[in-house]
Image: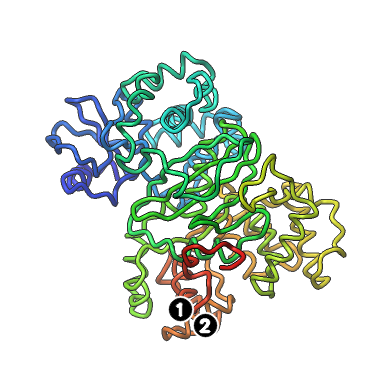
Amino acid sequence: MHSDREACAAAVRSRDARFDGWFFTGVRTTGIYCRPSCPAMTPKAGNMVFYPSAAAAQAEGFRACKRCRPDTTPGSPEWNVRADVVARAMRLIADGVVDRDGVAGLATRLGYSVRQVERQVRAELGAGPLALARAQRAQSARLLIETTDLPLADVAFAAGFGSIRAFNQTVQEVYAVAPRDLRRTRAVGRGQGPGAGEVGPEQAGPTHPQAWQLVPLRLAVRRPFLPDNVFGHLAATAVPGIEEWRDGAYVRSLRLPHGPAVVALAPEPDHVAARLWLSDLRDLGVAVSRCRWTLDLDADPQAVDEALGADRRLAPLVRRAPGRRVPRSGDAEEAALRIVLGQQVSAAAARTLAARLVVSHGTALPEPVGGVTHVFPAPPELADLDPAALAMPAARRRTFSGLVRALADGDVDVQPTADPVAAREGLAALPGVGPWTVESIAMRCLGDPDAFPATDLGVRRGAESVGLPGAPGALVAASAAWRPWRAYAVQHLWATSDHPINRLPEPGTTKESA
């Protein structure tokens, strides 16, 4: 979009928050860059230049606006819709691959040469992978400076910088202020826009155990944002020991590159309040990325609702509940295994089976956070599991064991950064994995916005309730007009029932009583 000057200028003049994250505005006369919705005085059109990423604006010497904090905008929704190499690269960069493995590691994951990746990413984003990772490190540093009392030297290395000098230089260039001065003024900036400020303990979950480093922050959302079904789904399917709904927040454990973590996410009117318990602060950026992915916060609700609302049968559902999101998982392999456990059984039965695996094979956290005590076992930790120990039919035991082996051996990749075509083919080749399982994994793990489990009973009943055909073949044909947003249509069709996945738990409830 950044190449359409007239459209960008119009969005800036109207301060249209829908375009935050789509492009960034550099102002030549001030040397700063802003989000489209910046409340400051609108610059003259001739003084504006538009960039596809914050990293591109920073590379041209622009500093982040202190008023609108453009580095905290929701991410571009393009990366969740597309499956090409640039989109996959952006998801990998957000997951910290460049910081851990360099551009060479990124290229290896993508199956391309370093030169090819550099060229394609730079052509579309206006900056290479290193610059994009640097911008992400700068944001992580700012969050740690403003929300913790860590010594600045510790902040530098936790944010991923290789030296104090690089840390000081980057913060100065991006924010036009030295790290120590940014910490002095943090109280002034609290509460000024998405991503700014500290979230109080009462806003997002249980108290702070001593074994963890606590980072409270706000997650920006692109509105409209309806939290009911995404939080309702996560709460209703929560597995004891690794997830719970407590004090108005969804709390769960995560397996991150440098150690375990626990996150608590609570919906607020204009943001999501988050608290992150990290065993290693180097995982901050990855944890934020996983939280945003879980709640589908970088979606483009305007585009989704316009497309689905054009169908007269879906239109009433969309008007009644705009801004629905697709609930995903911060641990794709865990979600895939749980989907197989849930084949042809109730959500309660699937939770029970998963909870038994947590007790028998899960990794205990260094200190519990509320009722969250473990991390779900990774596939290699389940490789020696005796299938006979699983209380389910023999055919499903074989399917579960086959998926465990495929994930552990790397024969199937269900991460959001995977090639979706290869992932679907690999899953479909496994015995006992049918269309429902493939599409459910594509929706919850790969993040495919067009995933459509047409054989799902809830989808079929919802379709029939609004006058759509219930037979899977006919329903797939009728859904063609909704592409590429059929996963969002699924959320609306599910919402025609009174199932707990469609609503927030009542205030004051915990998972056990929800």
Q: Are marks 2 and 1 in contact (CB under 8 Å)?
A: yes
The circle drawn on residue 26 is none
Residue 85 visible in the current orientation: no
For marks 2 and 1, the one nearer the N-term is 2
* Tag 2: amino acid: Arg
Hey, which residue is sitting farthest top in the picture? 165
For mark 2, give the secondary structure.
helix
Residue closer to the observer: 168 or 110? 168
> Which image quarter: residue 207?
top right
| Residue drawn where x is 19% and y is 25% of the image | 30
Number of numbered tags placed on the structure image: 2
Residue closer to the observer: 26 or 151? 151
> Which image quarter: residue 338?
bottom right
Residue bearing the label numbered 1: 496
Rendering coords of residue 20 (x, y %): 31, 45
Type of colouring: rainbow
The circle drawn on residue 461 is 2
For mark 1, give the secondary structure.
loop
Residue 81 in the image: above or below residue 120 = below
